[in-house]
């Protein structure tokens, strides 16, 4: 089975950061609204950790977008 490309994890984190900043939400507020830890949000945005689909869905719900929209980036 092929491992997920670390570049993909980084780009997903960047996408989350862009979406968060567009909405003028702090990492702390995003963490609170998505029921996640602020440090974890930072790690995700920097591409330092993988994230579960459930947590991605929580973030997408905060942004009021479809989960698939978080993957709208060039790999």
Image: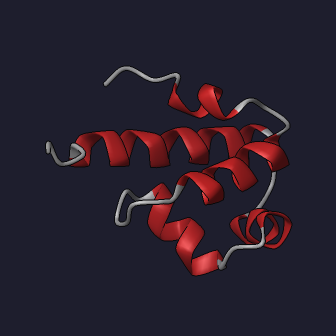
Residue at horizontal 65 percent and vertical 77 percent from the top: 38
Horizontal and vertical percent for residue 27? 69, 66
Q: Quadrant of the C terminus?
A: top left
Q: Quadrant of residue 54?
A: bottom right
Residue at horizontal 48 percent and vertical 60 percent from the top: 51
Q: Quadrant of residue 35?
A: bottom right
- The answer to which of 45 and 24 lies nearer the viewer is 45
Residue at horizontal 66 percent and vertical 35 percent from the top: 67
Q: How is the image coloured?
A: secondary structure
Q: Is residue 12 left or right of residue 49?
A: right
Horizontal and vertical percent for residue 40? 54, 74
Horizontal and vertical percent for residue 16? 59, 45
Q: Quadrant of the N terminus?
A: top left
Against 18, residue 35 (above or below) is below
Horizontal and vertical percent for residue 8? 32, 39
Looking at the rendered structure, the number of numbered marks drawn on it comes to 0
Q: Residue furthest front?
A: 1
Residue at horizontal 80 percent and vertical 42 percent from the top: 63
């Amino acid at each position: 089975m092929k491992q997920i490309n670390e570049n993909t994890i980084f780009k997903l984190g960047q996408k989350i950061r862009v979406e968060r900043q567009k909405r003028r939400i702090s990492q702390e507020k995003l963490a609170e609204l998505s029921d996640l830890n602020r440090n974890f949000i930072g790690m995700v945005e920097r591409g330092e950790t993988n994230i579960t689909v459930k947590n991605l869905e929580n973030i997408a719900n905060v942004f009021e977008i479809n989960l698939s929209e978080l993957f709208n980036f060039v790999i």
